[in-house]
Amino acid sequence: MTADPPLVPPEAVADALEGMAWPVAVTGGTGFVGSHLVDTLCAAGIRPRVLVRDPAAPRWIADREVEWVPGSLHDPEALERLVAGAGTVLHLAGVVRAPSAAAFERGNRLGTANVVAAVRGAAPGARLVHVSSQAALGPSPEIAGLGPEAEPHPVSAYGRSKLGAEREVQALGDELPWLILRPPAIHGPRDTDVLQFFKLAASGTVPLPSGERWVTMAWVGDVVRAVLAAAGGRGEAGRTCHLGEPEPYRMQAMVRLLAEAGGVRARVLPLPGAVLTAAGLVGSGLHLLGLHRVPMTRDKARELLARHWTLRTRDSLEALGLHDWTEFFDGARVTWAWYRREGWLR
């Protein structure tokens, strides 16, 4: 595993880092977005406290100067050690794959409730930044996307659990300053979800649901910048902010850009909705039999068949002081190079 320089150098977020209160506590610091966040903090000379389930397997941040706190989101004593006296709490941990709705609920809503309880008890003056998901809001009927004020209507167990997590944070009211960040699909080095589209593009064929569908995308570096901006005092406390590029992409156009960024040729294979629905039913059946690695389920098919996964982000980006962002093509070029270097793609 190659040690990378920080994707977001500290000088690029100097104002945010200066505005943060110390110590800094992080959940999800060994994951995709969280590890890039920890990279930036450590490169700035900050030694964050990081919750880790297995101290022997800290993944991407194994060689970083952090204060490890062994435990999980369901270990009250570990969470109390993590946030005790903290000035900033960055909550990125969550469950994106689970065998049941109950498992999503435990990993996301109940896990967040435990973090909130720990902050209330051991860090009552902290600023809490919670990274949620577009799935908590649900798809948009319009290409332009939904804003943070829209009524949520999640279409999956994952989305419902993330919305539940948001409500645990919102229940703090004015008790302490908090912000919720909702990113869309995030791409970048170390990701294993959007990676599937890179693999399909490399194979030459990308199956997509038939019909016109648009998506909002976010570069992982921009998400890190947003988390640090929120932690550093940008953005009004007690609000939800949407992340991602201000202009959405038509799915077919995004595949073309993805292929161009990697120097490959790829065609789109339209899939009828009935095929995806049937595949989701089969996948859910296999999950019931214990085959939880099967990616397609009824929930996943429902998400894929939604018309537009788009967000209105411009006002939120302005509020966070993010006046520039990385376009999908530029981020994809960096990601292709990283995947190939690491042997994830030929």
Image: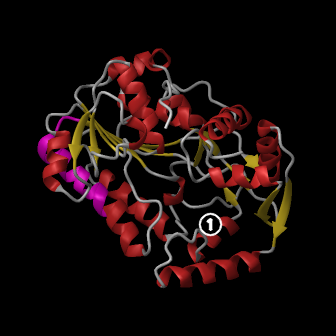
Residue drawn at x 26%, y 55% is 73
Judging depth in this view, the residue of 67 and 345 nearest the camera is: 345
Horizontal side of residue 144 vs 164, given as left or right: right
Say above or below: 227 vs 277. Answer: above
Determine which quarter of the picture holds residue 240. top left
Residue drawn at x 63%, y 77% is 280
Residue 285 location in percent, x, y?
55, 85
Horizontal side of residue 29 vs 81, given as left or right: right
Mark 1: give few (<14), some (14-19) or many (20+) Cα within 10 Å: some
Mark 1 lies on residue: 303
Q: Quadrant of the C terminus?
A: top right
Residue drawn at x 29%, y 58% is 111
Residue 127 location in percent, x, y?
28, 35
Horizontal side of residue 126 vs 135, given as left or right: left
Judging depth in this view, the residue of 326 and 231 nearest the camera is: 326
Judging depth in this view, the residue of 75 and 215 nearest the camera is: 75
Answer yes or no: is residue 235 visible: no
SS of the residue under disc 1: helix
Range covered by the magenta-colored residues? 110-126
Q: Is 117 one of the magenta-colored residues?
A: yes
Answer yes or no: is residue 304 visible: yes
Residue 143 location in percent, x, y?
73, 53
Q: Is 274 one of the magenta-colored residues?
A: no
Say above or below: 82 vs 221. Answer: below
Q: Amino acid at mark 1?
A: Glu
Determine which quarter of the picture holds residue 222. top right
